[in-house]
Image: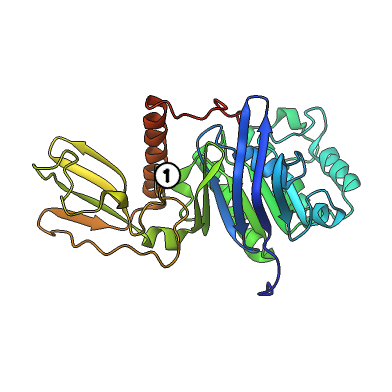
Amino acid sequence: MNSPTAPPALRATGLGRRFRGGWALRDCDIDIPAGSVTALVGANGAGKSTLLQLAADQLRPTTGQIRVFGDDPGSTASRERRAFLAQDKPLYPDLTVAETLRLVRELNTAFDTEAAERIVRAGNIRPRSRVGALSAGQRSRVALATVLAREADLLLLDEPLADLDPLVRHEITALLMAEAAERQLTLVISSHVLAEIENVCDRVLLLHRGEVRLDGDVQELRDGHTLVRGRAHEDTPDGLPPALDRAAVVESSRTGRLVTALVSHVPATPGQGMPSQDAPGRAATPFVWDQDRWETAAPSVEELLLGRLRAARAADADADADGYGDADGERSAA
């Protein structure tokens, strides 16, 4: 059980990281509670890998700071409490599975060999098999075994489900969730598989062009939005009701007479192209929808994130068209 006064598993304050091509992350404030499972999402180049590498002490910040359980990522205390799996799942292809586990055990003072072997056996992987001869799913299982067996409290996983078929993805996800529940782990998982986030993660962190655009509890974020569909109003260009505050509309689309919109219950932050980091105590006046014209529902996590991402891209396009794009140009792929 985590103490109410214990520091968050991951905290960033004014965090920024600049490469030659521009800012991969800029002015990020993040709090990830201990014991949570957080989905880190965003388009390619949004800064997801950069954030994980900063937390894993693979990179150092250009501005601001990042802390792991209150400690600098480079400290001994931090290294002992976190484990990082890079997107390319680095394993030596010429080593056998057994040799791989022995190597990781020798490099880490806290390593549960029995747990690693159990995870590998559950995937019907022979210890004498060469890593290079394994399937993508088998390599992912071995890589996760080397991370899960390190007895860390925080797992930083960069696209662990990428390039896996649906069955293997389901097996790997079940493995992660079982370990997280049994050991009360904190997981930060970057992913492009938005449809699977809803049943796996209890928090979501959305990055766009290196900035935090959405951060919070999944259920609270869903409760803070409404998905509406219905017949378009003839007297408005977007087809939405004239009385609806357009600042509350995250994103909308119109196909013929059918309009679909994602509406936030919190007004947009002034100066931003999309509602962002919903501020407590600023709930907008509820809009009463005509039930004969409109259907309303809570959005799925996928619908919520896709709406936010489309809104962000639309805002970028408008800014570029007006000549107010990022002076640093495109950010480094991250």
Judge from the rendering whether residue 226 lies leftward or rightward of residue 145; answer left or right: left
Q: Nearer the viewer, residue 304 or 212?
A: 212
Which residue is found at the position 76% from the left and 56% from the top? Answer: 152
Whole-percent x, y for residue 175 in the image: 62, 53
Colour basis: rainbow
Q: Nearer the viewer, residue 177 or 240?
A: 240
Element under label 1? loop
- Please state, as top left, top right, bottom left or bottom right, where the N terminus lies in the image: bottom right
Q: Is residue 159 visible?
A: no
Whole-percent x, y for residue 67 in the image: 73, 54
Amino acid type for the residue under numbered disc 1: Gln
Which residue is found at the position 60% from the left and 41% from the top? Answer: 26
Whole-percent x, y for residue 238 in the image: 19, 40
Q: Can you identify the residue that label 1 sits on?
A: 272
Total marks placed = 1
Q: Is residue 203 visible?
A: yes
Instruction: Write down the quadrant of residue 219 in the picture.
Output: bottom left
Q: Nearer the viewer, residue 327 or 229?
A: 327
